[in-house]
């Protein structure tokens, strides 16, 4: 399959409530296509078989740039994940979030060892294993920052990054600096913005919040990030998720992203 020229993608995690059946998926993909997207990340579609997903995205002319899996699936279901990626013609999968038992000093070291071991197994199959952060990974244990320890103590050829801009900012860190920190080991980045409403942080569309997108896009260009995946866990007010991902898409185009 030929790669699309665009860098802009969208994760189907956004549309999980609208993709529970193959018919739902095809209807949602049609709407996403009308917005202008050509690339999707396959996430949160537990009721659909990989072949059905492949048929649907191919029918609507989409390319799959990534998937998300949980830790149990990545380890115990290794062969199934490899087969899924083969069907989807995709070489990148990421751990969506680590289980809570890893968030302590000993757990952090155990998690690093686990990611290195399974990342090596995927690499041997010609696949990339990434890690999608939230704000939890900016906790310190024994004075060490969880996310920093992960990347400093794993082989870049075995453990890749999938930085999420919103969660980095919510963790008190600079998204652009983190994108630069993982230069060369991040094919996919997650784009979502952050705004404050009634003193609380909220998810919002790219370009509609407080993140510094000029710096983020510059860092992505300098770090050779291939796919910019729009993600928004939930919307604000009565706005539909389809409206939200359209706003993010249009804003990225206005920013000069192609």
Image (cartoon, grey):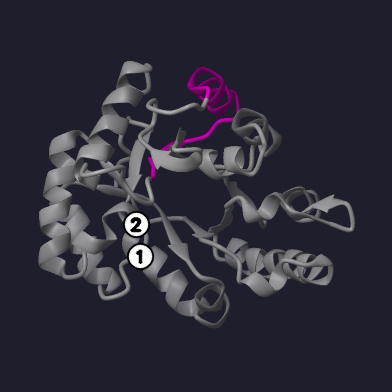
Residue 64 appears anywhere in the view? yes
Question: Where residue 139 sits in the image (x, y, percent)?
Answer: 74, 53
Residue 46 to residue 133: above or below: below
Tell whether 105 sits left or right of 68.
right
Question: Where residue 199 sits in the image (x, y, percent)?
Answer: 50, 38
What's the mark number on residue 76?
A: none
Tell whether 132 sits left or right of 55.
right
Question: Where residue 12 sits in the image (x, y, percent)?
Answer: 31, 54
Q: Residue at x 57, y 52 (%)?
A: 134
Q: Residues within 10 Å of mark 2 (few under 14, many from 20)?
A: many
Q: Does dot 2 land on a helix, a strand or a loop? A: helix
**The furthest residue to the bottom:** 76
Q: Residue at x 33, y 31 (%)?
A: 6
Residue 157 appears anywhere in the view? no
Which residue position holds label 1? 44
Q: Residue at x 26, y 55 (%)?
A: 15
Q: Does dot 1 land on a helix, a strand or a loop? A: loop
Residue 198 to residue 159: above or below: above
Between disc 1 and disc 2, whose residue precedes?
2
Question: Where residue 212 sits in the image (x, y, percent)?
Answer: 53, 22
**The furthest residue to the right:** 142
Tell whether 12 sits left or right of 36.
right
Tell whether 232 sits left or right of 107.
left
| Distance Cα–Cα, label 1 vs label 2 | 5 Å
Residue 99 to residue 1: above or below: below
Q: Residues within 10 Å of mark 1 (few under 14, many from 20)?
A: many
Image quarter hosting the C terminus: top left
Which residue position holds label 2? 13
Q: Residue at x 16, y 41 (%)?
A: 33
Q: In the rendered image, which quarter is residue 185 located in?
A: top right
Do callouts 1 and 2 mark residues in contact (Cβ within 8 Å)? Answer: yes
State the extent of the magenta-drawn residues as a range: 212-231
């Amino acid at each position: 399959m030929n790669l699309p020229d665009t860098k802009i993608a969208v994760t189907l995690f956004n549309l999980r409530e609208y993709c529970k059946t193959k018919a739902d998926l095809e209807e949602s993909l049609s709407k996403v296509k009308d917005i202008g997207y050509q690339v999707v990340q396959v996430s949160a579609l537990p009721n659909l078989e990989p072949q059905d997903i492949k048929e649907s995205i191919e029918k609507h002319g989409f390319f799959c740039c990534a998937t998300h899996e949980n830790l149990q699936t990545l380890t115990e279901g290794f062969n199934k994940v490899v087969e899924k990626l083969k069907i989807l013609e995709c070489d990148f999968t990421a751990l969506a979030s680590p289980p809570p038992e890893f968030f302590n000093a000993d757990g952090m070291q155990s998690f690093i060892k686990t990611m290195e071991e399974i990342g090596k197994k995927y690499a041997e199959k010609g696949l990339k294993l990434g890690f999608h952060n939230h704000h939890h990974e900016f906790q310190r244990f024994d004075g060490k920052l969880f996310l920093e320890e992960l990347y400093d103590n794993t082989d870049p050829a075995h453990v890749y990054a999938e930085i999420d801009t919103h969660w980095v900012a919510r963790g008190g860190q600079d998204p652009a600096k983190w994108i630069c920190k993982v230069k060369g080991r991040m094919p996919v980045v997650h784009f979502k913005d952050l705004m404050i409403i009634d003193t609380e942080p909220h998810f919002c569309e790219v370009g509609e919040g407080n993140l510094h997108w000029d710096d983020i896009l510059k860092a992505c260009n300098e770090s050779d990030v291939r796919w910019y995946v729009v993600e928004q866990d939930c919307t604000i007010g009565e706005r539909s998720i389809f409206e939200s991902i359209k706003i993010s898409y249009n804003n990225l185009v206005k920013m000069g992203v192609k």
